[in-house]
Image (cartoon, rainbow, N blue to C red):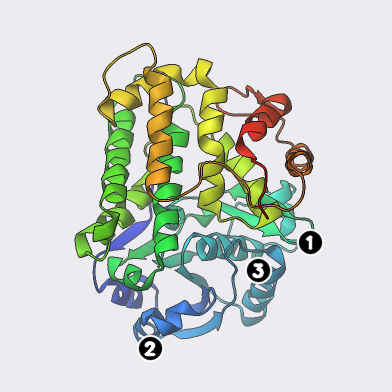
Amino acid sequence: MNFSYVNSTHIHFGQGQISAISHAISTDQKVLVIYGGGSIKRNGVFDQVSDALKHHQWIEFSGVEANPTVETLDKAVALAKKEDVDVILAVGGGSVIDGSKYVAAAAQYEGQGWDILMGKHQVTEALPIGVVLTLPATGSESNMGAVITKAETQDKLPFMSPAVLPAFAVLDPDVMKSLPERQLINGLVDAWVHICEQYITAPAGAMVQDGYAEALLKNLNVLAGEFDKRDNDAWRANLMWTANQALNGLIGSGVSQDWATHMIGHELTALYGVDHARSLAAVHSSLLRNQMQYKRAKLEQMGQNVFGLAPSPELAEQTVEYIERFYESLNVATRFTEYKGEKSDAINAIMGQLELHGMLALGENQAITLDHSRQILEVVVESSTL
């Protein structure tokens, strides 16, 4: 268990904290505010941001999609370069934050921004980033990762760099009051899978990481069970903080990590437009069963410590069933039907993208070959009713 860990993002957590951006960004810095479809102008967040920046010089860029595309983001890159901005302020959920990370990095690069996603350019410098989080889910507000889509080719690829770790993030649970039920559910599911991808691997004797991961999973399980109480300050605050802690680097330090569910799920989203969180739920349990020989010990640990199950020869299998119950309790499908045409055609399309993107050996053991991915998809993809 050897690792180096630092997370330098300054978190401003709690009600009324959007005002903190007034002193988090120097008044001599020009700010580019990036946001999505405009909901922040209907729920009062934009007004709060505007008030906090009243002594700053700032411009805005809107229209970042739920799965941010390079085609849209390159327009923001051009604007950042033209206006010579000093700071990016992302106001939104994970998609806006991921997109802002791309803009911050590409604005400091003279080549094509997509080079970053193709691995042709390693990001070592970027414009500083601040965040006002509006949707708890991805933890992107205090980590160094981003996922960007190229709509033209239906590619959805990740990049990571310490240079795009946000300098600060405002987490005000009040902004969740206007969120649709579907987005709250997606946040629960996304955070759940983030934890599982770092926890359900192989035993490492990492008592802090395991114990913290189990506490976070129990939090989400309780929040899902109390979903009818979601219009509650404590419920909102606990989801927002749990989702942040799920992917800020701590529970993944010094332990093996999986991320195969995400890699396969990304292809479902890129090809068929399914919500990111719901693509993960569709893939997750099938993948766990496929990789049972490697994951049995940690599944048994999760069964006992998270779900309170008794030891038994079938404990690992029972734990996967309880994971499926978590998704189903939120009315999130654990199979995929959101495509048109034949099941075999859908599987072949997904497999083609996995191969194109070099996803030839996934998981903590690199044991999920293309053959295994196809086996997983044979279970995941059910006959479509569309």
Question: Relative to 36, is 212 above or below?
Answer: above
Measure how far apart labels 1 and 2 are at the Cα level: 39 Å
Residue matched to label 3:
73
Kind of residue at badge 1: Glu
Mark toward the start of the polypeptide (2 vs 3): 2
Q: Residues within 10 Å of mark 3 (few under 14, many from 20)?
A: many
Percent from the top left, x then y, of residue 112?
76, 61
Report if residue 92 is visible in the image.
yes
Which quadrant, please, contains the C terminus? bottom right
Mark toward the start of the polypeptide (3 vs 1): 3
Residue placed at 52% from the left, 15% from the top?
Answer: 293
Residue placed at 61% from the left, 37% from the top?
Answer: 380
Mark 1 or mark 2, whichever is nearer to me: 1
Question: Relative to 72, is 119 above or below?
Answer: above
Which quadrant, please, contains the N terminus? top left
Tell me the element at label 2. loop
Residue matched to label 2:
54
Residue placed at 27% from the left, 27% from the top?
Answer: 305
Q: How many marks?
A: 3
Percent from the top left, x then y, of residue 12?
29, 64
Percent from the top left, x then y, of residue 234?
20, 59
Which of the pair 222/363 is nearer the observer?
A: 222
Measure how far apart labels 3 and 1 are at the Cα level: 13 Å
Residue matched to label 1:
152
Tell me the element at label 3. helix
Mark toward the start of the polypeptide (1 vs 2): 2
Residue placed at 54% from the left, 62% from the top?
Answer: 95
Mark 3 or mark 1, whichever is nearer to me: 1
